[in-house]
Amino acid sequence: RAKAAGGGCYRVFETGMGEELRRRQTLKVDLSGAIERGELELAFQPIVDLRSGRVGSFEALMRWNRARRGLVAPAEFIPTAEETGLILPIGRWALEHACTEAAGWPAEVKVAVNLSPFQFRQTDLAQDVAAALRVSGLSPGRLVLEITESLPLLGNCENLTVLHRLRELGVQIALDDFGTGYASLGYLHQFRFDNLKVDRSFVCSITKGREARTILHAVTRMAHMLGMTVTAEGVETPEQLRHVQMEGCDHVQGYFFSRPVPASEVGALIASLNGAAIP
Ligand code: C2E
Ligand code: MG
Ligand code: MG
Ligand code: MG
């Protein structure tokens, strides 16, 4: 039969495409009902302040507990959410939920929430953030908004205006995934971020050669001179920790300290990390 249809390879390819389309279609349909069905969750990963050795904040990381399929990682559904516009209600949910959780934590612990560049297209992002703060009662100084540089966000003046409006609310703004995009340095003179998060892929390379360490050292100094703090992402080993410490990073996030945990484990994790000495 395959032969009759003009060659086996072609046929297999065609079936594959159909499956992919169907997979994406059901993903969209399922995702559109995820909030109402209570399938979205936030996991929280601690970010440790190297100077004090204590937990300074937690990053809220979205998880989708998809019916009959189990946990889905954000890399698998955020792009679909952005494509369909579902990122707006989902992003709003994450903001409000993260702020509400954080309001119950010790007052010195902040929460960091990821914003999609697509959320900037909507004019009332600052209003959403203000609403999340109001509803949760969280003080603005305890909210950090993480913005990824993977899209040409700041090329657009309106986006820059939104950033300034967010800043006026009293929240902190972090540039996420630094070192992966194409506009890294360009971003820094357009807006004064409070915090720079050096991407995991970069942290990965620091034990492999002197060059990466020199770059991290220079980036950290530059960030400090511009009034930003620096967070190293994805630190997994004591060796990586030693290097990011040596090059002057202020905060560390990564499996070395902890994987992202459910909200119910945050309290115990703060206690155990704050009680432990940094090697
Ligand atoms: P991100 O904001 O850069 O978050 C850090 C990612 O690195 C998380 O992956 C975290 O689990 C992972 N990670 C942290 N430490 C380590 C480590 O030591 N080793 C390794 N291998 N990985 C580590 P996750 O949770 O899968 O999230 C991936 C991305 O999805 C995030 O990258 C962020 O861009 C996006 N994302 C997550 N939650 C949200 C959300 O609520 N809204 C939006 N718009 N994006 C989100
Ligand atoms: Mg992030
Ligand atoms: Mg990041
Ligand atoms: Mg990253």
Image (spheres, helix red, strand yellow):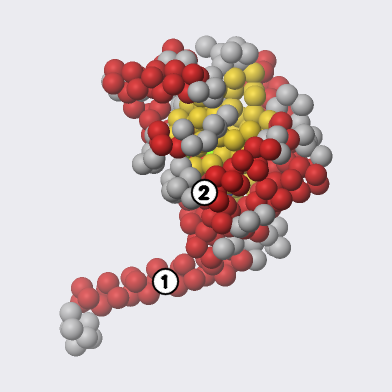
**Vertical placement of residue 104 versus 3, above or below:** above
- The quadrant of the rendering that contains the N terminus is bottom left
- Image x and y of residue 231, in percent: 52, 26
Left or right side of 248 for 15: left
Q: Which residue is depicted at the point 33% across and 18% down?
A: 214
Label 2: which secondary element: helix
- Image x and y of residue 150, in percent: 43, 45
Disc 1 from disc 2: Cα separation: 36 Å
Q: Which residue is mark 1?
A: 21
Question: In the image, what residue type sits under mark 1?
Answer: Leu
Q: Which residue is depicted at the point 54% across and 60% down?
A: 81
Q: Which residue is depicted at the point 73% across and 24% down?
A: 108
Circle 1/circle 2 CB separation < 8 Å: no
Residue 56 in view here? yes
- Image x and y of residue 175, in percent: 51, 36
Label 1: which secondary element: helix
